[in-house]
Amino acid sequence: MEPHLRRLQVEFDGTVLVTSVIAGLAARFGDTCARAIECVEASAESGMPIDPRIYLQESPSSSHPAGLAVAAVAEQRDPTPYLRRLREAILLERRRMDNGPALLDLARETGGLDLDRLRIDFGSNAIVEAFGEQLERARSVDARHHEPGAGRVKLPSIEFRAPDGSVHGVYGHRPWAEWRDAAVAAGATPVPARPDPEAALRAFGRLTTAEVAAACDLPGPRAPAELWRLALEWRVTPRRVVGGELWTAA
């Protein structure tokens, strides 16, 4: 979903406000080998790097602790940076984010958060209720768009809410054109400008090659070629991960 999100933020800059709803991947992970296969398939579909060994070696017990942590962070600030670090930590660094100390350490890495307040919020009833409301939103989506056997919406999904209250949804992983059509139907207006890779990295922080390609409209070999050219000039820095690179501005 991340490349589509980056393109959305660029192509509809200033006309779309993105908020996250944590739908709950699994209260208790069952067949983690199947999860690993899903990771490989998602990577092949999106071009995003993923290390499926997180589900083959010391798999996390549940995704819900991470969801509760995101709800707690949202009480202080936009949780998007923390949510991004969670995805990197779990799916690239193979870190078990299913317990309070690990989630608090990640908040420390993310920065800009009151850790003492967060430590208290992790166990508060208000955060449990806030997380429960998000799970209910995922369950309340029309059953036609549910993931088979999960009782909730397919992941990933996005809904664009127009000023008149109408909803234009795209459910499950779909081509970018469907996201764009739904955004326009909801009243969003695309802008023509596209950043260059270096500007995109300075705006967003760490990005994968697939995200740079989406944000900068550089299909095929153009994004990796440009990123490695910038790396040779010491203007961007690559970090090798399983399945690709994470890039940052130098």
Image: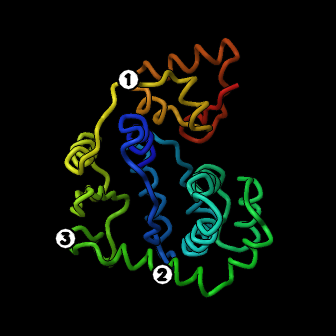
Residue at the far bottom: name it: 125
Q: Residue 215's image quarter?
A: top left
Residue 60 location, x and y as percent? 61, 70
Looking at the rendering, in which quadrant would you find the C terminus?
top right
Residue position marked by numbered label 1 in the rendering: 220
SS for dot 3: helix
Residue position marked by numbered label 2 in the rendering: 132
Q: Residue 247's image quarter?
A: top right
Residue at the far right: name it: 116
Report how many numbered discs are placed on residues in the image: 3
SS for dot 2: helix
Q: Residues within 10 Å of mark 1 (few under 14, many from 20)?
A: few
Residue position marked by numbered label 3 in the rendering: 144
Residue 4 marker:
none
Kind of residue at badge 2? Gly
Looking at the image, is mark 2 or mark 1 nearer the viewer? 2
Residue at left 47%, top 36%?
211
